[in-house]
Amino acid sequence: MVTAPSLHTARRVAAEVPDPELPMLTLADLGVLRDVRLASDGTVVASLTPTYSGCPAMAEMRADVAARLRGAGFAKVEIRTVLDPPWSTDLITAHGRRTLREYGIAPPGPAPRRTPGPVPLVLGAPRLAVGCPRCGSADTEETSRFSATACKSLWRCRACREPFEHVKEL
């Protein structure tokens, strides 16, 4: 049976796993790592929530967390995908938001609040005010709804003329 100090170790090891698409952040920084616990048989169970349902990096995240836990000496590891509650950009930690900005990626604002029931049809992307992570100017424009990954969009600052990515509010 794994002891309580080992649970602490398992949580620390899982929390240090970098995101495969944003390697300057950990899965814990992004709020993707939801839980690490011990099952009654001593299995370390880590729960992950994808940033969106079609996230192509989930297989890599699952494999990375399992490999890191096994590398730390945990023989029995189970990785679970948890879809409810869904991931939200509100789960990104303050440290994660600072790190995104330091790497030239505009962190998301608050996630949109949704009421229960059917989602209304909205034509066109909502108009956002995204500050430039380099100079801080609000005089920016979206140049592409998609960037290197589907969860980011590409923007340009009119003040400093630098392009930057923005993590979309989800």
Image (tube, grey):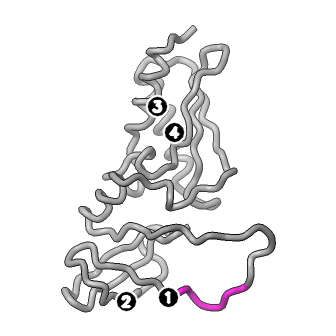
**Element assignment for label 4:** helix
Instruction: Tell me the CA gap for discs 2 and 4.
Output: 37 Å
> Which residue is under mark 4?
63
> Which residue is under mark 2?
141
Q: Nearer the viewer, mark 1 or mark 2?
A: 1
Q: Main secondary structure of the magenta part?
A: loop
User: What is the total number of numbered labels drawn onto the structure image?
Assistant: 4
Q: Position of residue 64 (x, y in %)?
A: 46, 39
Among numbered discs 3 and 1, the one appearing first in the sequence: 3
**Element assignment for label 1:** loop
Instruction: Tell me the CA gap for discs 2 and 3.
Output: 41 Å
What amino acid is labelled 1 in the image?
Answer: Arg
Q: Are marks 1 and 4 in contact (CB under 8 Å)?
A: no
Q: Are marks 3 and 1 in contact (CB under 8 Å)?
A: no
Instruction: Tell me the CA gap for discs 1 and 2.
Output: 10 Å
> Which residue is under mark 3?
67
> Residue 79 vs residue 135: left or right?
right
> Residue 82 vs residue 153: left or right?
right
Q: Position of residue 32 (x, y in %)?
A: 51, 48
Please name the residue shown 66% across and 45% down the image.
Answer: 82
Circle 1 packing at 10 Å, graded few (<14), some (14-19), many (20+), is: few
Q: Position of residue 58 (x, y in %)?
A: 55, 50
75 vs 117: above or below: above
Instruction: Tell me the CA gap for discs 1 and 4.
Output: 37 Å
Instruction: Tell me the CA gap for discs 3 and 1.
Output: 41 Å
What amino acid is labelled 4 in the image?
Answer: Ala
**Element assignment for label 3:** helix
Magenta region = 121-126
Q: Which label belongs to residue 127?
A: 1
Among numbered discs 1 and 2, the one appearing first in the sequence: 1
Among numbered discs 1 and 4, the one appearing first in the sequence: 4
Q: Nearer the viewer, mark 3 or mark 1?
A: 1
